[in-house]
Amino acid sequence: MGLMEMLRNGILVRVKKISSVVVAGLLRRFVVPAVLIPGLVMAAALGWRDWRDLGPNYYDSKAVFANAASVVEAYDGDTVYLDNNMIVRLVGINAPDRGQVGYEGAGKKLEDLVLNKKVWLEYDRYKDDKYGRVLAWLWVGCEAKPKFLPNNYMHKTNNESNLGLTSNPVGCKKGKLVQEEMVKAGKAETVSYKDRGELKYEKRIGAIVGL
């Protein structure tokens, strides 16, 4: 049984030296959004130690929002588990859930793309979700450290976004955007978030299916 399966099934992992109550209290002091605390506490129970280094600016923390990591498990077609013990939901796409047609195929495709490989995480205007998962674009096969535009790049005004990105970032011209590869393979669908601003590569991957 994989780590992601353990999380889904609600299996509690005991650790001797970390109290979940203490960790939760410290996370609140670090101004971590309340809805994310249960997920981070579980990550700490599973071995994540970098919670101590979160500091006062949660969304600037490299302990949570890493630049790069290796994928140790692909839970399904749009969620991976990293070697820094963080769960990442691939932003901008949606793959079949367990029990739905295409679930196993989507998970296998994502494994083929990223399992046991180094991935670079590019952040957008939304960096996490209500389940405590990190939201990111994943890049694989980069020739160097990519130079990403800031996560707030798309924000122009309250009612308008900047133009979406169509080219690979500097440092990853030979690499692949994982979400794009999943859509090309027919293993995931593009997602537009209602009442929320446009994402960096939303139109790029939408163009694959004529959106």
Image (cartoon, rainbow, N blue to C red):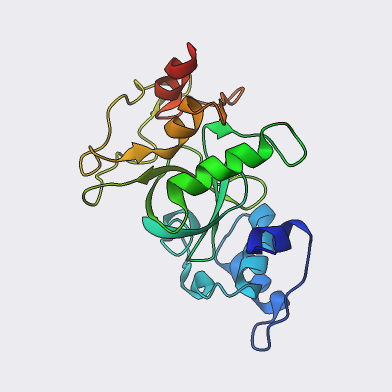
Examine the rendered structure and indicate whether residue 55 appears above or below residue 115: below
Where's residue 176, x and y in %? 34, 38
- Relative placement, left or right, of 25 versus 73 is right
The foreground one among 41 and 169 is 169
The foreground one among 189 and 203 is 189
Q: Residue furthest top?
A: 210
- Relative placement, left or right, of 43 versus 57 is right
- Relative placement, left or right, of 210 versus 38 is left
Q: Residue at x 45, y 29 (%)?
A: 199
| Residue 77 visible, this angle | no
Q: Residue at x 62, y 22 (%)?
A: 194
- Relative placement, left or right, of 2 versus 161 is right
Q: Residue at x 62, y 34 (%)?
A: 95
- Quarter the N terminus occupies: bottom right
- Please count the marks in the image: 0
Where's residue 136, x and y in %? 47, 44
Which quadrant holds residue 73?
bottom right
Examine the rendered structure and indicate whether residue 15 appears above or below residue 164: below
The foreground one among 95 and 201 is 95
| Residue 96 visible, this angle | yes
Examine the rendered structure and indicate whether residue 155 appears above or below residue 163: below
Q: Residue at x 40, y 56 (%)?
A: 117
Examine the rendered structure and indicate whether residue 180 appears above or below residue 33: above
Which quadrant holds residue 81?
bottom right
Where's residue 91, x and y in %? 52, 38
Where's residue 202, x and y in %? 45, 25
The foreground one among 202 and 82 is 82
